[in-house]
Image (tube, rainbow, N blue to C red):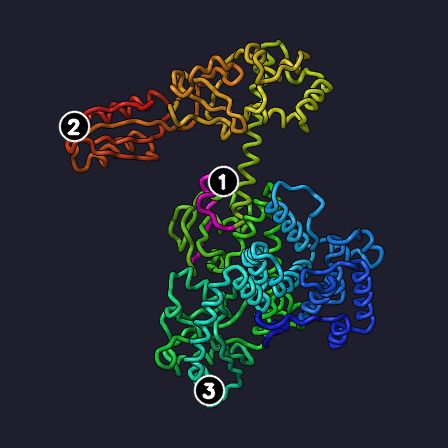
């Protein structure tokens, strides 16, 4: 199947598709009634865009008709073609979505609205506006896949006519195409569209590199034209000798594919081994494997370069056998072997649902893979904040390389290259990811940050009391995992903030002989209105995060006049009162300063850090300065008697410069049930050295016991706790 989208080379003139040409083409597969509906949409669109011109100088309506033509070559249904012709009327004309629904129907109005940008909302930056529009489009795509097919066709025609744009705008559009739209086409298996988007994007974003590589490939083609013809002939002859019916086509790798391989693997052009590729299309799956044996008998295979995408298809449903052989003169050649149906699906992907009446097995495979990805998008959408974050997760999810691993029951899971055990857990189910504590890979216990490789069997070990750790964000690679971890931590922080804020506010209300539950709802609503907050939980969280001073809020709830937190009067009147008891379980809204490393039994003080909560320092910490002059920014604190957990602190060990000192000190610390989080060393005069440890302890008594045991080592001269 060659050039199913009517793809043109970049250096040819872009053809104009008139409505008469489109209607003539549609006679191949649409009924007259449906063609009349498409023409009706054209009349509506032409009237809506009257007087508008593209930068090429042609009437604007030429663009929507060209977009519809691209979709027509994909055999899309008539409503999709109508939406394509109308895809810019909401965005670029006074036409409203409701008018489209009345004139045509709700389905077409939804399709057009899904493709339209969010142009009537104010954004802080162009990047934010683009991200919000892409988010809207991708979410519309989860309801109807035709939304993204229209957008891809729209982008493809825009890329074909990109030459009239300013260089800076041309590069921006090209980068967005390479970063978002070409990978989406790949994710949906529409290979023909992906290739053209990549080639056009490459030419516009790196024009000099494109020209240089194009010249190098042209030279290589000239030198090896005879080689390609000979290999084609040899393959065809051998197939006939073995009585196999198959079509052999030789081609050169696409420029962007060559360029990516050169960049990713740091290769020169001469080192890119599979510049030449040959595709063999046969009738049945069984024949594919037989033909593989034939080509391996004809040319020697390159070790480690065989991939069976028939048994284990790619994430986008692509199926084929790939092998790299030593061809004539030792030049490496790539052979792809597939059936006719696989070849059609490889070019059209999800569009094959409309383009061909595919069989249940392969056609449903592509649809189910697309459906899985769309479901992932929906789950990510529920767990993210702004559009920029959502787009970041989507980009991560569009990785081209995959790893295939197995569940204990033999189910195949497809993950991006570099995926970890945690990524696997979230791909199984969000709850599995949120509660995973360990894993077995090929029956061996491994850490959660372990990267997975092809063919491994992964078993997740869960605990109902466990939850995601912020450290997981440092190594997960899938958008779904990242979005769910961030969502969980944000919800956890919100709840912790509400609980701590309630404690802080109730402490101040107690000094005013009040209780929060006794305060009249109208008074609470009045305070919420003054702070411009939606509910009481938002106020409590704001108190915990240091955005609102608890004493000032308490006095306002008691009916006193509001005093600005930063004013002189506020600073004088808001003297700290009462003591906040630190339990050690407050979570992310109470942080422990890394300058003085407070631990239980230390005399402590809390300092409000707006947006982050309360930071606990040791009393006398040099970084506190004259904090008592700013009473509204600090709070007296003390440790509760039964503090739980372990706390980090820093110690300095001075020792003789002898072999094994670090190991012996580390061993003693470990024996005292303490973890070493960090260690650093410096040599002083060649005879002695200084070791600095960050260790975890339960309290001052635990620390004293550790220091006493370390001090008893013969090689240790001095040990102290750093402030």
Mark 1 or mark 3, which is nearer to you?
Answer: 3
Label 1 Cα crowd, 10 Å radius (few <14 / some 14-19 / many 20+): some
- Left or right of 619? Residue 111 is right
Q: Does the magenta stretch include residue 463?
A: yes
Kindly check if marks 3 and 2 are in contact, taking CB atoms under 8 A apart as contact.
Answer: no
Per the model, the C-alpha gap separating discs 1 and 3 is 58 Å
Q: Classify residue 691 by image quadrant.
A: top left
Q: Nearer the viewer, mark 3 or mark 2?
A: 3
Image position, residue 150 (x, y; %): 68, 61
- Residue 147, located in which quarter of the rendered image? bottom right
**Does residue 259 appear to the left or right of 89 in the view shown?**
left
* Residue density around tag 2, few if under 14, some if 14–19, many if 20 or more, within 10 Å: few
Residue contact between numbered discs 1 and 3, judged by CB atoms under 8 Å: no
Residue 611, image x and y in percent? Answer: 54, 29
Residue visible at 56% across and 40% down in the picture: 487
Q: Which mark is residue 503?
A: none
For this rendering, which residue is in front, 35 or 95?
Answer: 95
Task: Name the residue: 48% across, 59% down.
Answer: 402
Tell me the residue that label 2 is attached to.
Answer: 714
Q: Which range of residues does the magenta coloring cover?
A: 455-478
> Which quadrant does the N terminus fall into?
bottom right
Farthest residue, direction right: 102
User: In front: 697, or 129?
Assistant: 129
Which residue is labeled 1 in the image? 468
Q: Is mark 1 on a helix, strand or loop?
A: loop
Cα–Cα gap, marks 3 and 2? 81 Å
Q: Which SS class for mark 2?
A: loop
Which numbered disc, 3 or 2, marks the residue that appears first in the sequence? 3
């Amino acid at each position: 199947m060659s050039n199913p989208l009517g793809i043109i080379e970049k250096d040819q003139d872009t053809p104009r598709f008139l409505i008469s040409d489109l209607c003539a083409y549609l006679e191949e597969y649409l009924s007259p009634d449906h063609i009349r509906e498409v023409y009706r949409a054209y009349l509506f669109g032409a009237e809506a865009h009257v007087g508008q011109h593209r930068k090429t100088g042609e009437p604007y309506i030429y663009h929507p008709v060209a977009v519809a033509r691209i979709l027509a070559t994909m055999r899309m249904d008539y409503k999709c073609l109508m939406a394509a012709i109308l895809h810019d009327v909401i965005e670029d004309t006074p036409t409203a979505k409701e008018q489209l629904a009345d004139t045509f129907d709700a389905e077409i109005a939804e399709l057009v609205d899904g493709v339209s940008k969010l142009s009537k909302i104010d954004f802080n930056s162009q990047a934010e506006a683009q991200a919000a529009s892409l988010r809207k489009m991708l979410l519309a795509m989860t309801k109807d896949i035709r939304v993204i097919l229209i957008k891809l066709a729209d982008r493809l025609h825009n890329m074909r006519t990109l030459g009239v744009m300013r260089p800076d705008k041309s590069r921006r559009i090209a980068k967005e195409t390479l970063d978002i739209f070409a990978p989406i086409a790949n994710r949906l298996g529409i290979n023909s569209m992906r290739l053209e988007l990549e080639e056009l994007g490459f030419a516009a974003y790196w024009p000099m590199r494109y020209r240089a590589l194009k010249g190098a490939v042209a030279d290589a083609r000239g030198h090896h034209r005879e080689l390609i013809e000979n290999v084609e002939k040899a393959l065809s002859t051998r197939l006939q000798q073995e009585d196999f019916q198959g079509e052999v086509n030789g081609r050169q790798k696409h420029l962007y594919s060559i360029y990516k391989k050169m960049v990713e693997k740091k290769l020169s052009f001469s080192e890119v081994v599979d510049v030449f590729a040959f595709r063999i299309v046969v009738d049945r799956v069984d024949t594919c494997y037989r033909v593989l044996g034939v080509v391996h008998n004809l040319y020697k295979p390159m070790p480690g370069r065989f991939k069976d995408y028939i048994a284990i298809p790619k994430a986008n449903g692509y199926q084929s056998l790939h092998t790299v052989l030593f061809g004539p003169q030792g030049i490496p050649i790539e052979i792809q072997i597939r059936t006719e149906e696989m070849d059609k699906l490889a070019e059209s992907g999800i569009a094959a649902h409309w383009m061909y009446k595919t069989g249940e097995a392969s056609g449903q495979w592509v649809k189910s893979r697309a459906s899985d990805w769309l479901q992932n998008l929906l789950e990510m959408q529920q767990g993210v904040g702004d559009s920029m974050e959502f787009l970041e997760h989507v980009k991560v999810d569009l990785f081209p390389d995959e790893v295939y691993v197995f569940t204990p029951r033999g189910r195949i899971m497809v993950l991006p290259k570099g995926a970890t055990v945690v990524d696997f857990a979230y791909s199984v189910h969000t709850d599995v990811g949120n509660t995973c504590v360990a894993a077995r890979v090929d029956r061996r216990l491994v850490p959660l940050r372990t990267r997975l490789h092809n063919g491994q069997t992964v078993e997740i070990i869960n605990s109902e009391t466990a939850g995601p750790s912020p450290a997981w964000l440092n190594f997960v690679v899938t958008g779904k995992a990242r979005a769910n971890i961030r969502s969980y931590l944000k919800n956890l922080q919100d709840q912790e903030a509400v609980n701590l804020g309630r404690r802080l506010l109730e402490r101040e209300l107690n000094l005013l002989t009040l209780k929060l539950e006794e305060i009249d709802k109208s008074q609470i609503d009045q305070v919420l209105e003054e702070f411009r907050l939606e509910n009481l939980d938002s106020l409590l969280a704001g108190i915990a995060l240091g955005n609102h001073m608890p004493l000032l809020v308490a006095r306002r709830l008691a009916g006193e006049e509001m005093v600005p937190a930063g004013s002189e009067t506020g600073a004088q009147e808001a003297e700290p009162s009462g003591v906040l008891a630190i339990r050690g379980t407050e979570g992310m809204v109470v942080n422990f300063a890394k300058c003085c490393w407070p631990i239980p039994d230390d005399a402590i003080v809390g300092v409000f850090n707006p947006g982050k909560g309360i930071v606990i320092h040791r009393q006398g910490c040099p970084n506190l300065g004259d904090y008592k002059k700013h009473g509204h920014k600090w709070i007296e604190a003390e440790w509760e008697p039964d503090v739980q957990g372990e706390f980090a602190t820093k110690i300095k060990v001075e020792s003789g410069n002898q072999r094994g000192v670090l190991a012996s000190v580390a061993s003693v610390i470990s024996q005292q049930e303490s973890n070493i989080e960090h260690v650093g060393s410096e040599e002083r005069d060649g005879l002695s050295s200084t070791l600095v440890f960050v260790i975890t302890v339960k309290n001052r008594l635990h620390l004293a016991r550790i220091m006493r045991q370390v001090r008893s080592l013969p090689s240790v001269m001095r040990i102290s706790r750093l402030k």
